[in-house]
Amino acid sequence: MIPEDVLAFFDLKQGRRPKAILNVLVGKMTVSALFWGLEYDILEYLNFWKTIDTTSFLENVDRAVEGGFLAKKDELIYLTEAGQQKQFSCTTPTPFIKKVRLDEAIDLLLLANQVISEFSFKNNRYIPVSDNLRINVILKNWFKQLKSRNHHTTDIVQKYTQGLDELLSQLQQHDADILLSYLPNHVDPGWTIDQLAQAFGISKFQMELKIRLIFSKIISDAVLTKIAPFVDLLNSTIKENVMPDSTYQTWQLIRQGKTVDEVARLKHVKTNTVKEHILMAAILDSNFPFDKFVRFNFEIGKHPTEVDFRSIQSQIADITFFDFRLIQIRKIKEQQNNNGNR
């Protein structure tokens, strides 16, 4: 990793904490991690890169500060104009991808391409690109189902190729070339990330980020527009909801009309835990009914995260931190919606 790699996650005007960025990337599901992901407007990256080298990321933030690409002020990190010139230009993940087990979906797509390619050459003696048992079982069942619907080899290969062509047509040519080079084929394991990075003149980190973004795009397209035969392959990687299971269960009970105390008794948890689940729902549910939960109405200002809870508490004695955080979340969402997202 090089200092330029980390610049994509920082902003000229908004100071950010590097560890808060990493919490989002690795999928840390706490109220604090989600709140700062919302404030930084990077929740699309939630659980996007579980295997990212966090130590190297933090070290290169420090190097970027030393190099003048980032600036540190009051423990917050800002992108500098010099850093903006070096910033790696890339898209953001599709909103849908938060519901996908991305690494599993990528592994399935890589193995599927290898299997179909080898099948087209009538070769059944090869080493699979994935040795993960779950991935291989899912792929085997999908391939068996595909063969039951298409009895001839040419039909299976044609069906797969048509679907792949449709997905590739949704990509920019540059990204389609990268994907095709990365996919394993008959007697060809595909280019490594190192090879692709050298060929396209970017760092290894930037190439892996780009590949993940490409996959997030084609996975979302395949599932949302039901592109065969990929939608059947990827369905097993889709989570019912982006919220953790316990949070989602709490939120369902609350939506059914249960009170916080009732949910706490039903689930044998503390009321504070239920309130934390509600805050997580407020962050992750785009249709959260704030009017139902916000007890106080006051102007929190243009920068809600800069307002101190104690200063508000000195004005409104019975306000709780739950109330305060909920108002902050609502304000941030309103601002992002009004601005078309920062």
Image: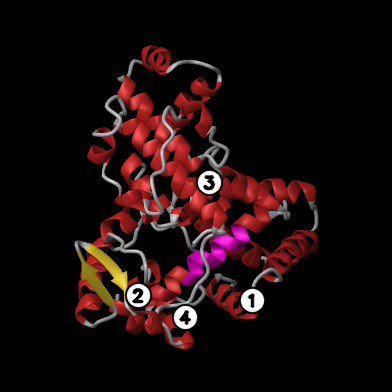
Asked if the magenta segment contains residue 96, the reply would be no
Mark 3 Cα-neighbour bin, 10 Å: few <14, some 14–19, many ≥20: some
Which region is colored magenta?
210-219
Three-letter amino acid code of the residue under disc 2:
Asp
Residue 131 visible in the snapshot? no
Marks 1/2 in contact by CB < 8 Å: the verdict is no
**Horizontal relation, residue 191 to residue 204: left or right:** right
| Residue annotated with mark 1 | 172
| Residue annotated with mark 4 | 196
Alpha carbons under labels 1 and 4: distance apart: 16 Å
Q: Secondary structure at mark 3?
A: helix
Q: Is residue 83 above or below residue 263?
A: below
Badge number at residue 99: 3
Marks 3/4 in contact by CB < 8 Å: the verdict is no
| Residue annotated with mark 2 | 5
Mark 2 Cα-neighbour bin, 10 Å: few <14, some 14–19, many ≥20: many
